[in-house]
Amino acid sequence: MSALGGADRRAVIFTDDPGWHGRVLTKALAARGVHASYASLKDCALNLAGARPRIVIPGFEQTPPAGAFVRGVPGGTLEEVILRLNVLHALDLTGVPVYNRGKAIERSVDKGLTSFLLLNAGIPTPRTWVVEGRAAARAVAAEALNEARSLVLKPLFGSQGEGLQRLFTLDDFDANPPVNGVYYLQTFVERAALPYADYRVLVVGGEACFAMSRTSEHWITNRARGAVCAAVPLSNPLRELAEAASAALEMDYAGVDLLQDAAGKWWVGEVNGVPAWWGLQQACGPAVTAAIVDGFCARLALA
């Protein structure tokens, strides 16, 4: 995509830790005529004391940003997280392109809602139960373990493979309390052979762009946990399922995780609304950042 033309447009990147992603984003955006600065959603506010609502963003006191790129929504209390998401909703409602929108972030950060939306759209996803209360969850686990070799207990909100527990027996269930009282239990997808592998597909603007495998001797195959990443062809069903999953959650761009079971069937595991792409870029090259930034700039051009 060529530069947007005219005076440089100013965008905000919401992040508490710019790091590598912040550097490549600001550099690529600058090449397209967009000046980006960082802000934490912790430092943003809603000023509703005047005739019109005002969204307070550090560095944008005089004029709102031309667009907002969401690289992170900090955790916190329920009230704090709701306020941070409300800032994204408010920007969207006032015509500022938000990438991804607050609605998409909410849908993807909540694994239970993600699984519901995937299944509701007819997209193959592992059998999942989202249960509050230990007794009810234990009954679910007992029945599920009669039909499956193992289950995975996941935090409802989490990333990079943190907090995952594999359950083979009810003793394993009893030894692993839930996070914040909610049990997200999912059938473990058995692979045909070791090592374990899953696949990450980047979808931008509804189109799958790049894919990589993540291979590990451990059943948790996140790159952050040491998995080896390698580019793979974007053939079906990787392309088709990833695009369908992104559409089901109404994402501007998404990192879609897929697995193939021992019988050869493909499953969509998760859909990431704030995906990191360092590993994907190492595997597939700098065109990864270019595709993401082009998608963001396309949103700006429509604003």
Image: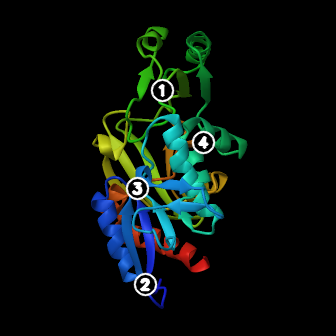
In the rendered structure, find residue 8 and report the number of the disc placed on it: 2
Q: Nearer the viewer, mark 2 or mark 3?
A: 2
Residue drawn at x 38%, y 56% as measured from the top left: 15
Who comes first in sequence, dot 2 or dot 3?
2
Q: Kindly identify the amino acid type of the residue bearing the numbered disc 1.
A: Val
The image's mark for residue 190 is none
Q: If you read the primary sequence from the N terminus, does the residue marked by circle 4 or circle 1 appear first?
A: 4
Q: Nearer the viewer, mark 4 or mark 1?
A: 4
> How far is the residue under mark 2 from the one under mark 1?
48 Å
Q: Is residue 204 visible?
A: no
The foreground one among 196 and 114 is 114
Q: Where does the C terminus fall, quadrant-wise?
A: bottom right
Of the two numbered discs 1 and 3 on the same chain, state the one appearing first in sequence.
1
Q: Secondary structure at mark 2?
A: loop
Please rate how many residues cluster around mark 3, counting C-alpha atoms within 10 Å: few if below 14, some from 14 to 19, many from 20: many
Q: Which residue is mark 1?
A: 152
Helix, strand or loop for disc 3: strand
Label 1 – label 3 distance at C-alpha: 23 Å
Residue 90 falls in image quadrant:
bottom right
Secondary element at image label 1: strand
Closer to the chain start, of discs 2 and 1, is 2
Residue that badge 4 annotates: 114
Q: Which amino acid is tagged 3? A: Met
Whole-number angstrom distance, CA of label 2 to CA of label 4 = 37 Å
Q: Nearer the viewer, mark 1 or mark 3?
A: 1
Which corner quadrant of the image does residue 276 belong to?
A: bottom left
Residue underneath mark 3? 212
Where is residue 291 drawn, in percent x and y? 45, 71
Q: Secondary structure at mark 4?
A: helix
Q: CA distance from mark 2 to mark 3?
A: 34 Å
Q: CA distance from mark 3 to mark 4?
A: 22 Å
Residue 69, above or below 148: below
